[in-house]
Amino acid sequence: MPKPQRSPQEVDAIRERILGHALDLIVEDGFENLSMRKLGRRLGFAAKTIYNYFASKDELYLCILMKGFEQLQLYIAEAVAPQDDPWARVEAGLGAFFAFGFEQPHMYDLMFTWRVPRYHDYLGTPVEPVAAEELRIALENDALFMALLRAAVPEDTEVSDAALRFEMIQAWSHMHGYIAGVNNRLLNYMHEDPASLRQAMVARVHGQLRRAVEELIQRGRLRAVADEGGA
């Protein structure tokens, strides 16, 4: 008698279990040492069973990344939803990024810190479409932050996306340095409790970002006045 077909909920639960244990193995042994055989032993079933859910190790890895970027987007979306003021929404988004980095340290490191394959490494391979989907989901977080910054710029003021993106990258670099320093405990040599600086760091990054964008807004207004005067 054939086995009854698993329900979609059961399939999703098994996929989630596989992804969770695969991330644990990557943390312990590195991406290059991840294998379906090791993963199968950890899960308690044959490696070939994993191929019923993921076509390859690389597809499995890319699905872990997709899950991480979807989680980050949810962190940000839930944090900014209660806020109405544009700059309060930016600050909430920054706080959500810190929260994700500290509450999901292994996933964060895989997404942003470790030297692991990225989209360009999969060009021309069978998993290029999966890698492209992972990149699309990752960039949704970029678009979300850009939208938060754009909403803080008055509609009648000209500020380029390139200028806003530069400020966003600078803010992200500041946040990433702090999160990585806390997670790898390097900052413990500089401060007795570096994690306690989190709210102050959110405020600092937010303040610097706001001042930088407000300066761009002022420059845009001055350019508009100059253009009107020369017309």
Image (tube, rainbow, N blue to C red):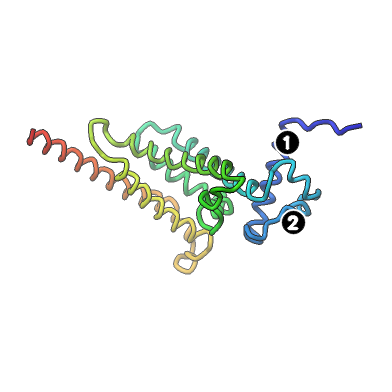
Task: Name the residue furthest front.
Answer: 124
Residue identifier under label 2: 38
Task: Name the residue furthest right.
Answer: 1
Q: Position of residue 18 (x, y in %)?
A: 70, 46
Q: Assess disc 1: are there few (<14), some (14-19) or many (≥20) residues with their C-alpha within 10 Å of its C-alpha.
A: some
Q: Residue placed at 39% from the left, 37% from the top?
A: 89
5 on left or right of 93: right
Task: Name the residue furthest left.
Answer: 230
Marks 1/2 in contact by CB < 8 Å: the verdict is: no
Circle nearer the N terminus (1, 2):
1
Three-letter amino acid code at the position of disc 1: Val
Q: Position of residue 138 (x, y in %)?
A: 50, 43
Three-letter amino acid code at the position of disc 2: Lys
Residue 44 vertical position relative to residue 156 in the rendered view, above or below: below
Residue identifier under label 1: 11
* Quadrant where the image shows the N terminus: top right
